[in-house]
Image: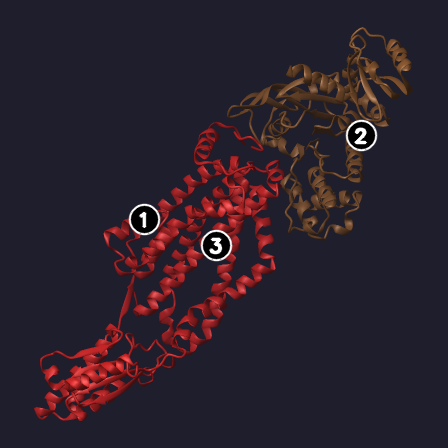
Chain colours: A red, B brown
């Protein structure tokens, strides 16, 4: 116990004191923020407004449609939580012309203009076409669902307005009648209901799961590299004359894990300090706040996930002899993590489908999938608990097996151990005394 | 020989007479790696106090033996006793170990590193600190204690490594090829440290493939070949057993006198002189007369056989 504690302390202090730790801890949030915001910004730089031509039977109808289209904010989630400034005005995104000459020759001319890139799309909206519900959006690129909805909503409203005015309803009354009903979404967690919207939810999932994924991978690989370093610098032999290999492995995993935890806590505090003033000013933003349950689960699944994967990485470090070999073997730990990130989309869509329930119970996927399900929609408690129990059980088993591999592997220098060799170590190590090895020292 | 032997030998030979208090005893231990037999039914006893040499060619099984003594690997069969009890974890803190391949944490400060190693051996922080200061002073490393290990020269790093092995004041110091890779100046420093530790009642076990070193330092040796002990005991007794069958000759001129099977069993030409092993029953005077008649002699000395000669003789026989 004392030895493990000494090793944890050394590992922790040596890592935390380095300049790279300080830089990483302070700069990573900045880099992350920039790298998340930058692609969207870059995409809009130099983005030209899309040039649409509305082909209508009368100029009057065309103009009316044009104005209403431009007045309509073009956003899926025109929620109050999205700040005004972030939303681009529709007129910045589109240039709309009206063409009241719906002839075949005009259509050909418009096609020609699209080909010469003079315009981007023409919309065929003659009275006849509207009457038979056969309007069309013609362009080089297909309109998005959002654009189609934008057009059909606006068009439908104008048609209704026209029909209502024919029946003697005034424009003001018609507006009143046609006012859309806004739907708010609330999330139920226990007895609490929080106003919430899908976008924020997905952002929350992505940020937290990426944090788990990246931290588990990053610190797991740190453990592997650190084991390799101790092997290659031969300090391992000196340590083994004082401590057991299990103490060394446990100390390393926990020490590196404590560094990771420190880093994450620093980031959460930083995020809190940055976010609090704006939260105070805009109470609505509190919708974005993570609930205590999710927070606790984040801590649990991060820690268990880290322990599971870093144990695997410690064993990989022990059976390999160089950094290059280690990198080749890394896939063993990376694949389950990547797979679980791939399965995130189905989890977000159908968090309680049978397949997802079973998948999220598999210990190697649980840190990401079960946690993802908890964020999307709190699953039944028994599922959370069984995934935690399964994770702990697997971890305990893996710890015993990897300690055996570790015990023998760390004394091997010459070449990477083959799978049959590793299997033999597992068998031999069982029968041995307080410390053991069946290997040639410099094979 | 030199001062050291006359100083240390009497006390250690006194102690070795009482075999019941052997510090470390290996009883019939074997270790196989797959088909390869690293250690083959080896038994040896290390008496307390003095310097014990584990000798053998490269690959003879020295490192495996040492690793079993400190419990890093477990023998396939046989038993290891420390102070008469079977080896257990509790014994680890009585050992100071310097592996053949040396290594330190490069980014750690020398003082922190030594304290860490001391604490792992069960010392308190302050004891480890005080002891590392004392040792650094002795090795003139005090000004380097605040520096990172990687800033030190190789020689200084080796001193730090040595301090790491002895700072917890172990009863037994076990070093695997401690002199390999040391420059002459550092070899002398290490040799002096060995002698001082031995004088203070510590037991030093070291392995080497260099017979001349063992010959100068050890009171007792065990010579291992292919995992088997082929020769062991007190150096003085071993040499006496071989008798003065060796002649060192420096000459100019014809060398045909060396090729007389009746007189010369074998010879080893070192360039400056030739070491001749006399044939059994041969008279050294006869060889002197023959040699003098053939060549100009500047030296003709009857002497104890060197350990190297004994080694070659014994290993040659056991390999034959």
Find out whether the residues at labels 3 and 1 contact each other: C-beta distance under 8 Å. Answer: no
Picture quadrant of residue A52: bottom left
**Rendering coords of residue A259 (x, y %):** 53, 55
> Are labels 2 and 3 assigned to the same chain?
no
Q: Which of the marked residues, 3 or 1, is nearer the chain's N terminus?
A: 3
Q: How far apart are marks 2 and 1 (CA)?
A: 65 Å
Report the residue marked by disc 2: B199
How far apart are the two marked residues, 2 and 3, measured between alpha carbons? 52 Å
Q: Residue A361 carries which label?
A: 1
Residue farthest along the left direction in this orientation: A167
Residue displayed at 47% across by 68% down: A271
Question: For mark 3, what is the residue?
Answer: A218
Chain for numbered disc 2: B
Q: Quadrant of the C terminus of chain A?
A: top right
- Would you say A342 lies left or right of B314 here? left
Is residue B151 or residue A279 the one in the foreground?
B151
Decide if residue A154 is in sight here: no
Q: In which quarter of the image is the N terminus of chain A?
A: top right
Say left or right for A326 vs A66.
right
Q: Quick check: B41 above or below B64?
A: above
The answer as to whether the residues below labels 3 and 1 share one chain is yes
Disc 1 is placed on an element classified as helix
């Amino acid at each position: 116990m004392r030895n493990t504690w000494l090793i944890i302390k050394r590992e922790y202090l040596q890592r935390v004191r380095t300049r790279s730790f300080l830089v990483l801890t302070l700069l990573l949030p900045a880099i992350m923020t920039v790298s998340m915001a930058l692609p969207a910004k870059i995409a809009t730089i130099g983005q030209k407004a899309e040039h649409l031509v509305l082909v209508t039977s009368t100029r009057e109808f065309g103009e009316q449609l044009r104005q209403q289209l431009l007045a309509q904010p073009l956003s899926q989630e025109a929620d109050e939580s999205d700040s005004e400034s972030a939303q681009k005005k529709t007129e910045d995104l589109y240039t709309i012309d009206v063409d009241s000459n719906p002839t075949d020759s005009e259509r050909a001319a418009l096609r020609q203009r699209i080909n010469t890139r003079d315009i981007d799309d023409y919309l065929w909206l003659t009275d006849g076409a509207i009457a038979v519900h056969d309007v069309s959006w013609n362009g080089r690129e297909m309109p998005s669902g959002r654009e189609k909805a934008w057009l059909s909503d606006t068009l439908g409203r104008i048609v209704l307005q026209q029909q209502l005015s024919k029946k003697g309803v005034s424009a003001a009354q018609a507006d009143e009648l046609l006012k859309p009903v806004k739907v708010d979404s609330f999330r139920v967690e226990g007895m609490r209901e929080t106003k919430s919207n899908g976008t924020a939810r997905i952002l929350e999932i992505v940020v937290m799961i990426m944090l788990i994924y990246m931290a588990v991978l990053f610190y797991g690989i740190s453990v592997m590299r650190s084991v390799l370093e101790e092997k290659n610098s031969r300090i391992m032999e000196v340590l083994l004359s004082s401590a057991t290999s299990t103490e060394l492995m446990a100390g390393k995993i926990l020490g590196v894990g404590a560094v990771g935890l420190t880093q994450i806590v620093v980031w959460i505090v930083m995020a809190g300090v940055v976010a609090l003033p704006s939260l105070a000013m805009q109470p609505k933003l509190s919708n974005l706040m993570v609930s205590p349950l999710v927070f606790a689960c984040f801590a649990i699944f991060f820690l268990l996930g880290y322990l599971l994967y870093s144990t695997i990485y410690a064993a990989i470090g022990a059976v390999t002899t160089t950094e290059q070999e280690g990198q080749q073997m890394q896939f063993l730990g990376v694949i389950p993590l990547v797979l679980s990130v791939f399965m995130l989309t189905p989890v977000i869509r159908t968090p309680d489908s049978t397949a997802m329930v079973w998948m999220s119970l598999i210990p190697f996927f649980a840190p990401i999938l079960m946690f993802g399900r908890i964020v999307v929609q709190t699953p039944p408690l028994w599922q959370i608990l069984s995934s935690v129990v399964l994770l702990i059980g697997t971890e305990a088993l893996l710890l015993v097996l990897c300690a055996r591999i570790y015990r023998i592997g760390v004394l091997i220098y010459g070449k990477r151990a083959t799978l049959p060799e590793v299997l033999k170590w597992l068998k031999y190590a069982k029968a041995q005394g307080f410390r053991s090895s069946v290997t040639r020292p410099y094979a | 020989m030199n001062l050291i032997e006359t100083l240390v030998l009497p006390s250690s030979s006194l102690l070795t007479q009482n075999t019941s208090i052997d510090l470390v005893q290996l009883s019939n231990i074997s270790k196989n790696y797959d088909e390869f037999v690293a250690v083959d039914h080896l038994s040896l006893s290390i008496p307390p106090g003095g310097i014990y040499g584990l000798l053998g060619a490269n690959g003879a099984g020295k490192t495996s033996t040492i690793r079993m003594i400190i419990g890093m690997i477990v023998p396939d069969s046989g038993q290891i006793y420390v102070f008469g009890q079977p080896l257990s974890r509790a014994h680890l803190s009585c050992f100071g170990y310097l592996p053949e391949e040396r290594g330190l944490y490069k980014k750690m400060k020398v003082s922190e590193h030594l304290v860490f190693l001391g604490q792992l051996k069960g010392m308190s922080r302050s004891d480890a600190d005080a002891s590392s200061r004392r040792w650094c002073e002795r090795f003139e490393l005090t000004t380097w204690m605040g520096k990172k290990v990687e800033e030190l020269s190789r020689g200084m790093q080796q001193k730090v490594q040595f301090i790491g092995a002895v700072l917890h004041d172990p009863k037994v110091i076990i070093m695997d090829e401690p002199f390999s890779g040391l420059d002459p100046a550092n070899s002398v420093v290490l040799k002096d440290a060995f002698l001082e530790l031995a004088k203070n009642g510590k037991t030093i076990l070291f392995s080497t493939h260099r017979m001349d070193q063992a010959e100068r330092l050890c009171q007792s040796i065990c010579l291992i070949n292919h995992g088997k002990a082929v020769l062991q005991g007190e150096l003085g007794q071993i040499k006496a057993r071989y008798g003065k069958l060796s002649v060192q000759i420096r000459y100019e001129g014809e060398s045909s006198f060396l090729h007389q099977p009746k007189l010369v069993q074998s010879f080893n030409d070192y360039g400056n002189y030739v070491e001749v092993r006399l044939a059994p029953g041969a008279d050294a005077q006869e060889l002197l007369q023959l040699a003098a008649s053939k060549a100009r002699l500047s030296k003709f000395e009857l002497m104890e056989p060197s350990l190297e000669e004994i080694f070659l003789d014994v290993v040659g026989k056991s390999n034959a």
